[in-house]
Amino acid sequence: MFYRFFHKKPLPNPSSAPTKQQLPRTIGLAQLTLIGVGSTLGTGIFFAMAETVPLAGPAVIVSFLLAALTAGLTALCYAEVSSALPVSGASYTYTYITMGEGAAVMVAACLLLEWGIAGAAVAVGWSAYLNQLIEMVIGWTIPEMWREPPFLKNGEGLEAGGAGVVNLPAIVVVALCTLLLLRGSRESARLNALLTITKVSILLLFVAMSLTVFRAEHFAPFLPFGITGVSTAAAIIFFSFVGLDSVVNASEEAINPQRNIPRAITAALVIVTSVYVLVAVSSLGVQAYDQFMGINGALPAILLRATESRVTSIVLATGAVISIFSVTLLTLFGQARIYFAMARDGLLPVRLANIDAKTHCPRASTLLAGIAIMPLAGFLPSHVLWAMVSLGTLMVFIAVALSLILLRQRRQTESGFRVPFYPATPIVSIAACIYLIANLSGTVFTLFAVWLTLALLFYGLFGQRGAHQLARHQGRMAT
C-alpha cells in the first residue's frame, strides 16, 4: 500500500530556471523578521499568563526561558536547513528530501495541526478581545449567541449545549485575513510589518505603565509549585513560540534566503523572548501570582486594576486585537504554503499549486486554508483547539533537527549558515522537545495518533498515486 513511503525528493538545483509553479522573491530581511515576530508575538503573551502563572507562580519567568531555549535550539537547526534548501514547504519539504515521502506526509499533518488549528484558536481569542474592547469603549457586548460556540469543553472532549450558535467574529477575522492574503505576499508582508510594530509598541507601553505600581514582594515565594510546575507551564508556554517557523515558510519568496533566513529567525527569536520576559516580569510585579486565574490574568484587566485608567486599558485591548489579527493572518499564510508545496509534489490536487498571474499568490491554496479554518473557529472552543497544537509543533521541530543531521551527511557544503556546536545542537534540540512532550496528557497522544492515521490513509489511497503520476509525467517531459 505504501510503495513510495521511502521515496526521497532530490536536492533542489539552485541553477535551474524558475517555473510557473515557483513563487517570486519579493520579501526582504526586515519583512522576514517581522513575519517571525508578528506570527509569534501576541498569541502567547495575551493568553498564556492566565494559564501558566497559577501553575508555576513567579517562576513562570523560568518557564518562558525554558520554552525559548527549546525554540532557540530548533531555530538554529531551521536556519541551516533553510539556508541550504530555500524552498516552499518548510519542514515538510526538508523531511521529503532527507527521510522520504511517507515521513513528509506525517510532518505535513503536524504542520496542518500547527497552522490550521492554531489559526482557528487564535481567531477565537480575537473574538473575545474584540468583545472586551467594544464593551470598554461603548458599554455594549456582542450577543452571546453570535460570539460563543455551540459546543462546550467536557474534560478534554466536547459536548453540545454551548451558549451560542456560532462565533461569528472568529469567522469574520479568518475571512478578512484570507482576502488580504489573496492580494499577494508583498502586500501581506507590508501590512504585517505595520501591525507588528504597532503591537510591540503597545506591549512596551504596558511594561512602562506597570513600572509605576511595581512591587518586588510579589515575586516571593519564587517557586511555590516546584520544578514540576515550571515544567508543566513551559510545555503550555511553548504555544507562545509557535510561529517562528513562519519565516521558513517564506523561504521561496525571500530575497537572498541563504543570508536573510538565518538572520531573520535569530532576530525574531531574540525580540519575541525579550518582550515575553519583560511583560511577564511586569505583570507579576503588578499583581500576586494567586490572582491570575481566568480573566484576571488578561493584560488589559491587570493594567486596569493597577492604574485605574480606562484609557490605557482600552489602548492595550486595542493592541490585543491588532496582535491577534496579525497572528491569524500569518497562520493562514503558513497553512496555504503547505498545501501549495504538497500539491506541487502531487500529494494534493495539482490545482492547489497554481499561482495567480497578477498577485503571484497561490490562490486556490489560500482559499482552501481559509475555508478549512472557518468552521473550526466558528464552532469549537479555544481550549479544545489548543489541545493538540503543541505536540504537532514539537514533532515538527524534532523532524527539522533530524533533517539537519541527515542533510549534513548528504550535502557536504560550507555555504550558508552553519549550526554551532554540531552535532550537539540538534541532539539537545531533540531531547528538549521530548522533555516538553513528556508533560502533555495521554488524551492528546491518542487524538494525535488518530490524526496521523487518517493522514496516512489519505496518503495510501490518494496521495502517493498522485505523486507517482506526477513523477512519470515529469520524466516524460524531461526525455
Image (cartoon, rainbow, N blue to C red):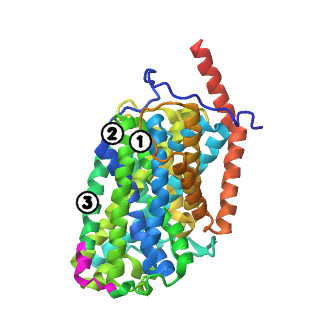
Mark 1–mark 2 contact, CB under 8 Å?
yes
Q: Which mark is residue 198?
A: 3
Residue 174, by quadrant, is: bottom left
Q: Amino acid at mark 1?
A: Ala
Q: Does dot 3 land on a helix, a strand or a loop?
A: helix
- Residue at image coords 47%, 45%: 78
First of labels 2, 3 by sequence position: 2
Q: Is residue 347 above or below residue 475?
A: below
Q: Quadrant of the C terminus?
A: top right
First of labels 1, 3 by sequence position: 3
Q: Which residue is mark 1?
A: 250
Residue in the foreground of this view, choosing between 435 and 183:
435
Q: Is residue 67 above or below residue 38?
A: below
In screen coordinates, is 133 left or right of 462?
Answer: left
Q: Which residue is mark 2?
A: 27
- Residue at image coords 54%, 54%: 429
Q: Which mark is residue 39?
A: none
